[in-house]
Image: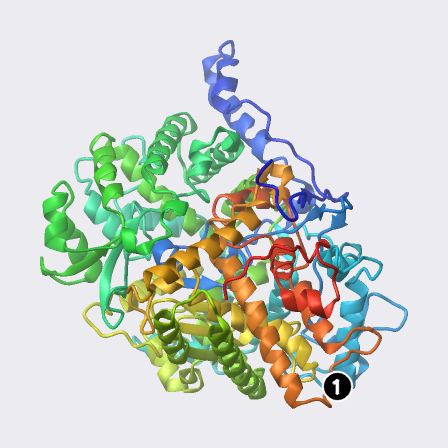
């Protein structure tokens, strides 16, 4: 095939683990066909038999899995379906370094036709369940508690008692044991770097993937758990009869109460579904659990607005954000909806039918727990799915939405009322904003075609179906805050969708809930106790070195015109750096003031969550009409990730990622530049990728490129698109999508080049630096590339791979290594790779 270029035979094939639950749902007929076979059954038994069919089909999970299903997902930011604030255009304005749900549980077949296990390496310093540092014992591949670190309190690498030599010994041992030194690094560097990883790791039953990032999050979560579990001083004083107790309570105390309420499973079980039923009644009821529901008083605008007050966007996504044309000002923004499954293909592609069946079963299970009569609920579920499928058909695919300029339309509330008079926009925004709105209020709209089609669908859909769908999307999120019956239903759904065999421990779910909803409060506890200010200073210095490297690369650039180069230099000079955490976290009064309207009680997890959701909505909606403060952080510190914001021209490196393998103060600089240095370069390059280049140095959508430079950019970007298009994932019988992933691939390639250039400049100024690791016969420059590659060792379940294919903007880890290094002249030179060897093709793609 013509598409097979370099590494055209690279393949990802799922590795089946022997201990994994095997459970086939892919080839069964749908439940409607099965019902036709039951015509001979007495009508009185029909509801029971239907219920049995659903349960036997989607509930056949191992006993081991059911023991832990009371827990939920581990990380909100990495779960596709549970992000209550998932906005496509807004997310496009802020990139994320860590990939979407991704398990590289695969085999690779590079050009030489030799299978290579796709693995992932533990590049972090491991810690035990109490947070103590671990190190390898001689002659043993397992980790034991380091004798120097047996302590009554949690310690970890940020303030580790391990000295310079112990850290280097530990890192060398960790890196070396995952390498396959018999592999030729010039033929398949991924195998060379990660070839033995699978000998030490398999995907845990509670994960859809296992990789470096999961390991780092585990280490970080243990630390956060210990912080949240610390006793609350004078706890009883917070519950005296005082109406102001929550306004005077410290933010950190509220975070601990929120965690405590989440962990109180006995209380959740006692309360059952009552809190949710009470709330649904206030919202007008859920028709699926009320056969006699009356649509007389149903108001689409009121229901959508009231759900928005709980930070839920359904049918229309609405938020307040910087105007991409004038990033100094906040503006109301609207976009097309999100769906209950990862993408529109799940509703439209027949090959995804098993996921749609599982989704139906999930809705039915939750509704019956809430008291829905089974027979009537079946029809409601069918109507609901039919309605959501119609929504999927009118949504514009993500691949057609990459050019934000084509999507953006500045309008007003009054104009929307004229365009779409069937929807009371004024009433909707009055409720959402909590005030009377002006018809001249500006709105940035990214979805005019979608809105035309949406209102046509709504006009031809019964109110009962619309109400069922709106409430379902809200209830679906609220299953996180209910007792274990709801979590069991969700785990069964996740087993089909992602292959996750069981849920993580309850404490991990609760840590995630606190970090997702009260990340600044939890972050304050974290940075005060663990964050080393030296790492912040080191990262700042490295960032400046990477910026200088970019300037030098820009100067050498032959395809970019001088005019465009001048603007690019201005953009890099104006790039705002955020490292570690915002300073206000150390000011207890200022931090507490930010959470003053949040109610927190150790016994009411459901109500605590609603209070936080209302808080988030209020904070956002009060921004309207104000000027954007580009110094404000929008990311919690205790997360393992990094970001670039296009409309702020800002890069953010939270404290949580400043840990091995990305960074350690005792590491050789080769590892730090190959770790966090590449991340820094990656985020810098996002300012100049296919989307980032559309924004100027102030974060405004503006054409600052000359036509010849634009043409040259697209030609070089096309080379990279074609390259990544040639990588095959045979288990799902499809190629990688080089178009959707182009932005991240451009950033990977640019980040590696800048980081290596910065490292070379550093080493030239520090020729006597000790850049080697004991027991690893590689130079510092070779270690740079090794550490970069080992970050991407990992495993992934087949269902998780399939779920990512239609939506993922990041390439699988194997290709983030092979694709990037095969384009690197520096890599080929440092490893002396012959021309046209597997990792050194004669034709390379290069942008920055």
Q: Is residue 824 above or below residue 88?
A: below
Give the left or right position of residue 91, taking residue 483 as reference.
left
Quadrant of res 608: bottom left
In front here: 483 or 164?
164
Which colour assignment does the render follow? Answer: rainbow
Q: Position of residue 338 (x, y in %)?
A: 37, 47
- At x 68% / y 72%, what residue is drawn? 784
Which residue is at a point 55% across and 41% down the rendered structure image?
497
Observer-nearest residue: 653 or 317? 653
Left or right of residue 475, residue 439 in this image: left
User: SS class of the residue under badge 1?
Assistant: loop
Residue located beneath label 1 in the image: 770
Residue 469's spot in the image, x, y percent?
33, 39
**The N terminus appears in which quarter of the rendering?**
top right
Residue name at image x 47 percent, y 76 percent: 555
Residue 302: % across, % down: 20, 48
In the displayed structure, 169 sits above or below 311; it is below
Res 788 visible: yes
Residue sitting at the far top:
40
Within 10 Å of disc 1 (Cα), the crowding (few <14, some 14-19, many 20+) is few
């Amino acid at each position: 095939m013509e598409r097979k270029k370099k590494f055209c035979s690279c393949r990802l094939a799922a590795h089946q683990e022997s201990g994994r639950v095997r459970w086939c749902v892919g080839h069964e007929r749908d439940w409607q066909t099965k019902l036709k076979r039951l015509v001979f059954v007495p009508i009185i038994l029909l509801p029971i038999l239907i219920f049995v069919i659903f349960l036997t089909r989607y509930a056949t999970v191992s006993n081991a899995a059911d023991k832990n299903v009371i827990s939920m997902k581990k990380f909100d930011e990495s779960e596709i379906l549970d992000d209550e604030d998932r906005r496509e255009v807004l997310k496009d304005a802020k990139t994320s370094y860590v990939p979407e749900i991704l398990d590289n549980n695969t085999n690779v077949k590079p050009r030489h036709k030799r299978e290579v296990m796709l693995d992932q390496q533990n590049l972090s310093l491991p810690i035990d369940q109490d947070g103590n540092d671990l190190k390898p014992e001689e002659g043993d591949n397992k980790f034991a508690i380091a004798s120097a670190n047996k302590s009554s309190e949690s310690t970890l690498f940020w303030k580790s008692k391990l000295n310079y030599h112990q850290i280097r010994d530990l890192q060398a041992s960790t890196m070396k044991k995952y390498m396959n030194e018999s592999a030729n690094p010039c033929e398949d560097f991924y195998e060379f770097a990660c070839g033995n990883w699978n000998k030490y790791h398999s995907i845990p039953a509670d994960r859809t993937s296992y990789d470096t990032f999961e390991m780092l999050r585990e280490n970080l979560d243990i630390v956060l758990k210990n912080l949240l579990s610390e006793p609350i001083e004078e706890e009883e004083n917070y519950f005296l009869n005082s109406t102001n107790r929550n306004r005077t309570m410290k933010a950190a105390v509220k975070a601990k109460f929120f965690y405590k309420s989440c962990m109180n499973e006995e209380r959740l079980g006692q309360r059952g579904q009552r809190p949710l039923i009470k709330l649904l009644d206030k919202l007008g009821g859920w028709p699926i659990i009320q056969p006699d529901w009356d649509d007389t008083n149903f108001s689409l605008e009121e229901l959508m607005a009231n759900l928005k007050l709980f930070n839920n966007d359904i049918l229309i996504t609405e938020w307040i954000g910087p105007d991409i044309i004038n990033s100094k000002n906040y503006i109301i923004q609207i976009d097309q909806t999100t769906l209950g499954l990862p993408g529109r293909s799940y509703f439209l592609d027949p090959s995804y039918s098993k996921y749609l069946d599982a989704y139906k079963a999930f809705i039915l299970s939750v509704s019956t727990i809430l008291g829905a009569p089974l027979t009537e609920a079946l029809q409601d579920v069918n109507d609901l799915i039919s309605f959501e499928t119609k929504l999927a058909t009118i949504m514009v695919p993500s691949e057609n939405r990459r050019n934000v300029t084509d999507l953006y339309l500045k309008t007003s509330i009054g104009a929307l009322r004229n365009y779409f008079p069937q929807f009371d926009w004024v009433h909707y925004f009055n409720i959402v904003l909590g005030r009377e709105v002006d018809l001249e209020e500006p709105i940035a709209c990214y979805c005019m075609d979608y809105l035309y089609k949406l209102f046509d669908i709504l006009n031809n859909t019964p109110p009962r179906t619309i109400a069922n769908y709106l409430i379902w999307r809200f209830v679906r999120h609220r299953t996180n805050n209910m007792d274990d019956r709801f979590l069991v239903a969700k785990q069964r759904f996740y087993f089909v969708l992602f292959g996750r065999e069981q849920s993580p421990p309850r404490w991990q779910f609760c840590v995630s809930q606190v970090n997702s909803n009260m990340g600044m409060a939890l972050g304050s506890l974290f940075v005060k106790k663990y964050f080393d200010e030296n790492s912040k200073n080191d990262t700042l210095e490295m960032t400046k070195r990477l910026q200088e490297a970019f300037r030098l690369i820009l100067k050498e650039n032959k395809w970019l015109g001088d005019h465009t180069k001048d603007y690019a230099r201005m953009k890099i000079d104006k790039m705002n750096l955020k490292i570690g955490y915002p300073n206000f976290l150390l000011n207890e009064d200022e931090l507490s003031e930010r959470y003053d309207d949040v109610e927190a009680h150790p016994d009411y997890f459901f109500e605590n969550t609603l209070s936080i959701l209302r808080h988030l909505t209020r904070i956002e909606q009060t921004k309207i009409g104000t000027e954007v403060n580009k110094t404000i952080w929008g990311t919690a510190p205790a997360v393992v990730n990094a970001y670039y914001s296009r409309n702020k021209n800002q890069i953010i490196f939270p404290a949580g990622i400043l840990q091995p393998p990305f960074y350690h103060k005792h590491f050789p600089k080769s590892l730090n530049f190959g770790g966090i240095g590449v991340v820094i370069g990656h985020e810098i390059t996002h300012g100049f990728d296919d989307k980032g280049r559309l924004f100027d140095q102030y974060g405004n959508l503006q054409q600052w490129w000359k036509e010849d430079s634009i043409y040259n950019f697209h030609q070089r970007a096309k080379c990279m698109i074609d390259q990544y298009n040639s990588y095959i994932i045979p288990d799902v019988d499809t190629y990688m999508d080089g178009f959707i992933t182009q932005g991240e691939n451009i950033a990977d390639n640019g980040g590696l080049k800048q980081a290596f250039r910065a490292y070379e400049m550093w080493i030239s100024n520090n020729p006597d630096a000790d850049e080697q690791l004991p027991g690893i016969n590689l130079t510092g420059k070779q270690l740079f590339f090794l550490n970069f590659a080992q970050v991407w060792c990992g495993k992934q379940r087949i269902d998780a791979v399939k779920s990512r294919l239609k939506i993922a903007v990041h390439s699988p880890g194997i290709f983030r290594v092979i694709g990037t290094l095969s384009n690197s002249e520096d890599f080929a030179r440092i490893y002396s790779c012959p021309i046209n060897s597997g990792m050194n093709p004669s034709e390379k793609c290069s942008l920055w």
